[in-house]
Image (cartoon, rainbow, N blue to C red):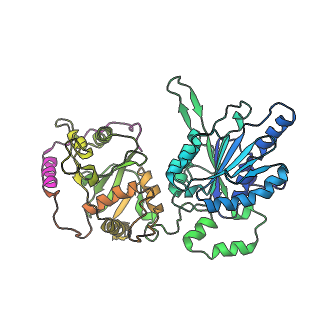
Amino acid sequence: MAGFTPNPGPQTRFLRSKVFEVLYGGAAGGGKTEALIVLPGYKLALEDQRYQRGEIKQSRGWDIYFRRTTPRLLQTIDRAHPIYKAIDPAVKYNANEHMFTFRCGFKVQYGHMEHVQDRLNYSGPEFSGGSFDEVTEFEEEQYCFIVDSRLRTSDPALKPYIFARAATNPVGRGVGWVKRRFKIGEVAPETVIRVNITIPETGEVITRDRMFIPARVQDNPHIGKEYYAGLLQMSPAMREALYHGSWDAVEGAFFEDCWDRGYHVVEDRPPRPGTFRFRSCDWGYYPGKCVVVWWEVDWDGVMTAYHCLVVQQHTASMVADRIREIERHYGDWNDEEGRSMLYGPLDRQCWAEQGSSAPNIAEEMIRKGVNWIKSEKNRVAMADQVRQRLIARIPTPDGKQRSMIAFMKRCKYLIDTLPLLPRDENNPEDVDTDAEDHGYDAVGYACLSRPMKPVAPANENDDIIDELARRRSEAKRSTVRPSGGIAGWK
């Protein structure tokens, strides 16, 4: 492209990739923004050739580039002007729409989505390409709305060149969902992740592939050693993220000083016979998530999460059915009584306000045999209890130590989200509740229900707990375990 020569290595591979959805990111200085600015160049060249040959009167190509806020968007537009002018001296810019229109009619628009609902401002046009700069600043709903519903074209010649592209450093509140979507740390970099979608009406399978291409500061020959030195003087978390491109170090994370994967993540195994077991739940329907966590408490008081269910757009009845399925697998469901042998804290907002006559979320699940008690709702105490368990260590018989809380590897959602939770800027004693805190709340309710030291007197749940404990002790526990896994477990 005129006025721009891509750096050899990752930046070139990013620009040439034919994969539908590609993330380019990691360390600072890898040339991510420049790559996104010039990204439409190949399609633009094809459209300009069609225009000059008289095949089209005007291109239908319309690519869009996003930044979360307007000030950052305007900075990128300033960088784009000389590049686009070098490509096409006749290019026109509409400042009101932040739109570049080239002589062949191809458009490149620059948009922002500061608020989640702003995504609806882009529900009309069809875009032939979408790019997100610093994608970890965006909410998952914003990204998915554009990528999954707005990228299309009625021009057959453009269809092979529809793409979704994103670039970012591994910082910001969206690190968790971006890391999961592109399976960073799960598969080798630049592995094509195949996503098959079946059309219900026809049974046709559509493939939408994804890939992550890591960026390194060393890959940019235009950056001097002084820039390296600046990155190396940053705080440990920022140094890991911006110099080494680590997706596991988050500056300002709420549990930054106490999360240690070596202590807090343990191998999968069945819960041990004779240990106390219970579950906890943070309720959500959409766009939030409903997270249910199953816990084993051993003789030392160590809480280990041994299973985690994460669902969206599930009613209370549907969640209860999933819980029954999982608890049958673990032998915690009494088929004779049609009830669970477990109980645990559920978000107290799931109980109806006084005076309501309709069944509420809690009542609906209890009617289906899934027992709950009301969660405590002191967020500062909850944060303190989770932190205490993460920090506390007890000795093991082999002379080592273990944490007072742990998560089996199958509880991947919790392992991915807890360490990345940012601190609330207005309340440093709590997590940012606008971040993905559904799993944290489920963990927090569990910790409040079994505090390491008393935080409240006897509460309204005591009679329920006593009754459930009595019924559990009288129930005949099944020792039969079905073979194989359960479809749809998370």
**Residue closer to the observer: 225 or 178:** 178
Asked which quadrant contains residue 334, the reply is top left
The range drawn in magenta is: 463-490
Task: Answer left or right for 337 relative to 417.
Answer: left
x then y, percent, for residue 106:
75, 42
x then y, percent, for residue 160:
71, 35
Task: Answer left or right for 267 relative to 318.
Answer: right
Residue located at (65% from left, 63% from top):
27
**Residue closer to the observer: 346 or 279:** 346
Residue located at (35% from left, 51% from top):
306
Relative height, residue 457 to residue 439 (above, below): below
User: Does residue 468 belong to the magenta stretch?
Assistant: yes
Residue located at (41% from left, 60% from top):
433
Number of numbered discs overlaid on the protein picture: 0
Asked which quadrant contains residue 62, the reply is top right
x then y, percent, for residue 30:
70, 61
Task: Answer left or right for 209 relative to 47.
Answer: left
Q: Tell me, yes or no, if residue 34 can be seen here.
A: yes
x then y, percent, for residue 256:
47, 68
Q: Quadrant of the C terminus?
A: top left
Relative height, residue 158 to residue 351 (above, below): above
Q: Tell me, yes or no, if residue 397 can be seen here.
A: no
Q: Furthest-top residue in view? A: 202
Relative height, residue 125 to residue 217 (above, below): above
User: Does residue 346 belong to the magenta stretch?
Assistant: no
Q: Furthest-front residue in view? A: 96
